[in-house]
Amino acid sequence: MRSTPRAFTLVELLAVVAIIGVLAALVIGSVSKIRDAARRSTCASNLRQIYAAFQLHAADNRGLFPAERQPYTTSGDVSSNPNPKGDNWQAEISRYVLRDGLLGDVKKVGADSNIAHCPSFDLLFPNATLASSNYKTAGYGMNSNLNIGGTDTNGNPIALGGSKLSISTRFPAASIINPAKSVLVADSSDYHIAVSGSWTTTTNTDPTNNMGKPDGYASGAPYRHGSNANYLFADGHVVSMSPADALPFLAFKP
């Protein structure tokens, strides 16, 4: 006696579809995490090479690291030892990290990668240009609270009658106090990381705005890579840290 083939019931079909959906979600989530991890790893590698660029800059400039930025033109900030190009730190070291020696436009998503910028920053800020802004960055900022020979780099500069260095003044690499516990460069949507005690959010996150900071923070990018960001210390090592863990290493240490 020939048996009659049994067809799937509607409930069984729905169960199969549901299982396939769950498996697809797991696979897609895993792929996304793998891509995020790859970008985080590439960023960390970039920072190590950026540290090498700082060292090359020092070798070519009497042992000096570049100033964080060029002199202010509106507030009267002056510097006795400004960046030779009159630009910020990332433009000053560009000759050591970019083939043509110029920052120009931030690399667009999908173009050949280079170590000048964070790959996750590209996804947030694909249309940013570096040529027309004092605040140019390629996804990294320099710590504004370094202790240079016992004085802060962020504040009322000595040249204006204050007691601190100017962020527009180059400084000897060897004068950084406690480099193993001081962040030099880290993820940021601006040229700086000026954080004191807490992270400050901003509403100007428009990638098409010259001052827009798509990471959502006025300075720094504490969640650039998921729940963490990458930090290059002044002795050359790189660490991925949570926002809370990073704060003590971004502060001025007397």
Image (tube, grey):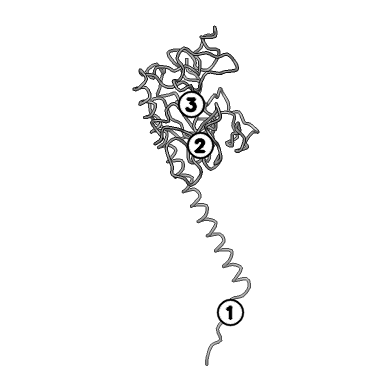
Give the alpha-carbon distance from disc 1 to disc 3, as whole Å.
66 Å
Indicate whether 164 appears above or below 137. Answer: above
- For residue 102, what is the image quadrant? top left
Q: How many marks?
A: 3
Indicate whether 120 appears above or below 202. Answer: below
| Amino acid, disc 3 | Met
- Image position, residue 211 (x, y; %): 60, 31
Residue visible at 46% across and 31% down in the picture: 231
Residue 105: mark: 2
Pick the front one: 15 or 40? 40
| Amino acid, disc 2 | Asp
Which element carries disc 2, helix, strand or loop? loop
Instruction: Tell me which numbered mark, 3 or 2, is placed earlier along the sequence.
Output: 2
- Assess disc 2: are there few (<14), some (14-19) or many (≥20) residues with their C-alpha within 10 Å of its C-alpha: some
Residue 7: mark: 1
Is residue 196 found left or right of 85 in the rendered image? right
- For residue 239, what is the image quadrant? top left
| Amino acid, disc 1 | Ala
- Assess disc 1: are there few (<14), some (14-19) or many (≥20) residues with their C-alpha within 10 Å of its C-alpha: few
Residue visible at 44% across and 23% down in the picture: 182
Is residue 214 found left or right of 31 in the rendered image? right
Which element carries disc 3, helix, strand or loop? strand
Can you tell which of label 3 and label 2 is closer to the viewer?
2
State the residue lying farthest toward the top: 161
- Image position, residue 70 (x, y; %): 51, 21
